Image: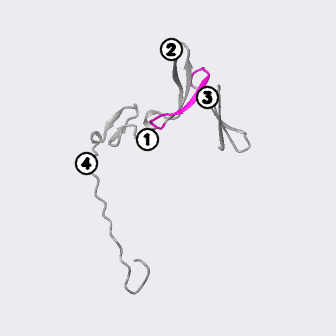
Amino acid sequence: MALAEMDVLGLKLLDSLRRPVAQISPAIEAPVSFLALGDDGNLGMYFSDGHDKKFGPTYEALGFCELPLACGLRGVCSAAGKCGDFSAYGVRPRRRTAAIMSATRRPSPTSTTWR
């Protein structure tokens, strides 16, 4: 894929010669108004709902459990799309991260290179 193009029918993915590679169509029959990258990292297509005067999602690229950190750092996402704690699965993550130690290197007295 080299290019992406959006129109009211959805998102078209094109190669470098502008030939269609894939088409992502909205889940409901409504003209697509815009694409947006959400604060959760999900790419979505949205339409204008004239009745409610709001924008509504018509397509989201990833399901909830496919999103990075959907359930936080210590959570696990179930097949039902619900978050749980690792401890329910017998895993207890460490509470603190280990400190990182750094060592300085000194030049060799007989060489100009570092060891």
Helix, strand or loop at mark 2:
loop
On screen, residue 27 above or below 14: above
Mark closest to the chain's N terminus, 3 or 1 = 3
Q: Position of residue 21 (x, y in %)?
A: 67, 39
Q: Which residues are magenta?
A: 27-41
Residue extending farthest top: 51
Amino acid of disc 1: Pro
Amino acid of disc 4: Arg
On screen, residue 105 above or below 97: below
Helix, strand or loop at mark 4:
loop
Q: Report how far apart the C-alphas of labels 4 and 3 lie in the structure.
A: 44 Å
Residue 33 inside the magenta-drawn segment: yes
Helix, strand or loop at mark 1:
loop
Q: Position of residue 7 (x, y in %)?
A: 66, 28
Mark closest to the chain's N terminus, 4 or 3 = 3
Q: Report how far apart the C-alphas of labels 1 and 4 lie in the structure.
A: 21 Å
Residue 60 inside the magenta-drawn segment: no
What residue did someone put label 1 on? 68
Name the mark on residue 52: 2
21 and 17: which one is in front? 17
What residue did someone put label 3 on? 25
